[in-house]
Amino acid sequence: LDSQIIENTKRTLHYVSGEKKNTSNVMNQSYADLLKEIQATLEDGAFSTASQSAGQTRNILRIGIHSLGSPLWGEKGGMTEKSSGIDPSLIRFLYALRALLRSAFGVCMITMPTHLFQELAFLRRVEHMCDTVVHLESFVGSSREKNPAFSEYHGLFNIVKLPRLNSLICHIPDTMDLAFKLKRKKF
């Protein structure tokens, strides 16, 4: 993209406090604050499908959330403070975000440090709440790094889930595991 297009774009940043003060039993405060901010942006920017704009061209709201579910967000790997059960805050946040975006002209891309989650079942629930799920796996430090079959590649791009919006079945590619190379300006 041209640098002028990026400079002229309206951007909003949300800073996470990292505090785990829980004012409601529904989800932790960091997730609740972000949901409120996204909802306000949807309403103020006329990104909602219900808002009528006379003669105004509509744009798409693009949301990027980096490292959701990390300790910065007050998350403990999906576990409660007593480690006796699963903390539903992240699942509830994703469910509420999904509901907001279903009635809006918007898209959200989330990155998650899945290696921090202790329960595989919790991770599967998180994946179920998303439309598309991909995993990136680096060869650095693994046994595949020295494998001659992977010598010209830097890692694997695993497609876990593809979107099935408004259809019974989605396109399924020949393989769900792809290799990638990193170059200076290419992926």
Image: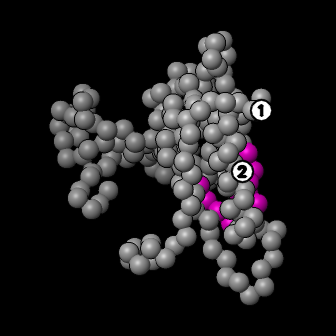
Q: Position of residue 14 (x, y in %)?
A: 57, 51
For marks 1 and 2 on the same chain, the one whose residue lies earlier in the sequence: 1
Q: Image point 36% across, 38% down: which residue? A: 137
Q: Is 97 part of what is drawn in magenta?
A: yes
Instruction: Please state which of residues 171 and 145 is positioned toward the viewer in this rendering.
Output: 145
Residue matched to label 2: 36
Q: Is residue 69 above or below residue 181?
A: above
> What is the distance, in whole Å, between disc 1 and disc 2 at their CAs?
14 Å
Q: Secondary structure at mark 1?
A: loop
Residue matched to label 1: 24
Q: Viewed as shown, does residue 70 lie left or right of 108?
A: left
Q: Position of residue 178 (x, y in %)?
A: 37, 47
Q: Secondary structure at mark 2?
A: helix
Q: Image point 63% across, 39% down: which residue? A: 30
For the N terminus, the quadrant is bottom left
Q: Amino acid at mark 2?
A: Lys
| Crowding near the residue tagged with mark 1, few <14, some 14–19, many ≥20 C-alpha atoms within 10 Å | few
Q: Amino acid at mark 1?
A: Ser
Residue extending furthest bottom?
Answer: 55
The coloring applied to the image is one colour
For the C terminus, the quadrant is bottom left
Q: Is residue 58 above or below residue 93?
A: below
Which disc number belongs to residue 112? none
